[in-house]
Amino acid sequence: MATSVAGESRAQFSSKIGFILAAAGSAVGLGNIWGFPTQAASNGGGAFLLIYLFMVFLLGYPLLVAELAIGRYSQANPIKSSGAIMPKGLAGSGRALAVVGLITASCILSFYAILAGWLLGFFISPLLEIVGFTEAATWLETFSTGRNLLLMGLFMAATIYIVKSGVAEGIERWSTRLMPVLVVLFLVLIAYIMTQSGAMAGLKMFLVPDFSQVDSGMIHSAMGQAFFSLSLGACTMMVYGSYLRKDADLPKTAGQVALIDTGIAFIAGLLIMPAMFVAQNNGVKIFDEAGNLESSGDLVFEVLPAMFETMGGAGLLVSIIFFALMVIAALTSSISLLEVPVSTASEELNLPRSTSSWLIGGVISVLSVAIIFNFGWLFDAVIVASTEYAQPILGVVFALLVGWVWKRDGLLSELRQGAPEMETSLFWKIWPWYVRVVCPAMLLFVFLS
Ligand code: PHE
């Protein structure tokens, strides 16, 4: 059962570019467009950007190659994949790790759907306003249990619908269509915001680092942000790797995904940091006297709609475009999260894909409902537990498996399939010991400091 764990009939991404767009679609989401700019804004802008880049390329990227390699090696679901790279006696513990990954992915989706639901609300609200349903529009933008339930349900239903259609049909087609739209929409909005007065101050904060802001807390945030943004440590990249063709060059593909992900976070920063200052220029209070963000977590949900309002007639249109873009980005991530338990259940329990999609989507929705009814404490708790602890720890544990447990020849022959020159490459000289020693040491350092 070592080399090819799954049968011939397993689905695959039909093209390399399709895979890259799908994997980048998973990576690009609320993490880049909401998380990154907010964190950059509250952590000194340029300095956070630099440390984040360091974390993405020197910690996240090597781990991304590791997770993709595990998945593609066995071409099977995470449970089989993690079992397959372990020596015979330890296969059970490999599978147990994957179960932790499945639970992590499910927990992430349970809060992600709530957050993405709000974006959906801000997208639908101006549409309702245009047709005269002002009260409904306001209701959609105001925090309430009813609104949270409705919007989460809608977002989850859309996620389930896409996932149930399968890999090439659903995920690949949607990601290939939606990702380029996202980039174009961003560029249009950046061009718009740069014409507004105040934008330059935001640009300066984002691009000129202020190193006095660097401390251990900020480094920890940057690390968590990198794991969340690259979709690491939740078996997502393992599953996507399992659909990747054997002739794809893993280090190169992972590099492209990391570049796209980071590029979009950077572009999001280029939009949102200037947008904050434009809003401030228009009388919206963004920073307090001490220069701290007035509302960090809800920056997007409070400050941006306020900014769109001050833009006059165009604001309505801009806000529709902006939130459409956010929902699109969130969908290509949420489908990758749901794909993790769905593909596993379909294969392990022999369930039809549509059954497992509705079943597991349903269970995760119940989790989301529980969070909504206990919002005050549970929302943050689930976010912290899954993204600040489970993801980094699991990501590094997978790296340890690849570095210490997986036989070196097996690993090499897996990577060589898409890159015949691998053995003599610089990558192969550095990467194996790097994921063995440097990545775990970096994680330990961040946790301890
Ligand atoms: N990377 C996604 C984002 O930035 C979130 C995500 C995390 C997706 C983990 C899959 C797995 O929004």
Image: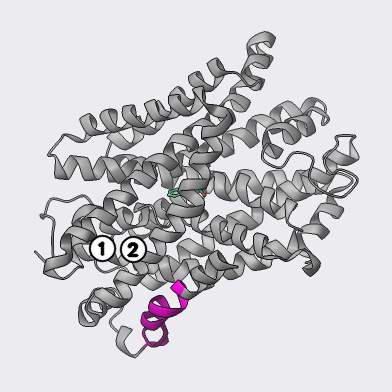
Position above or below: 362 against 412: above
Q: Classify the position of the N terminus by image quarter.
A: bottom left
Classified by dominant secondary structure, the portion drawn in magenta counts as helix
Viewer-side residue, 25 vs 235: 235
Q: Residues within 10 Å of mark 2 (few under 14, many from 20)?
A: many
Mark 2 sits on what residue? 68
| Residue occupying image coordinates x 86% and y 40% | 280
Which contiguous range is marked in magenta?
425-440
Amino acid carrying label 1: it is: Arg
Q: Position of residue 93 (x, y in %)?
A: 22, 60
385 on left or right of 211: left
| Residue occupying image coordinates x 24% and y 74% | 406
Amino acid carrying label 2: it is: Leu
- The answer to whether marks 2 and 1 mark residues whose Cβ atoms lie closer than 8 Å is yes
Res 89 seen here? yes
Position above or below: 263 against 325: below
Residue 194 lies in the magenta stretch: no
Give how far apart the Cα atoms at labels 2 and 1 are. 6 Å
Secondary structure under tag 2 reads helix
Residue 436 lies in the magenta stretch: yes
Mark 1 sits on what residue? 72
Res 75 seen here? no
264 on left or right of 40: left
421 on left or right of 368: left
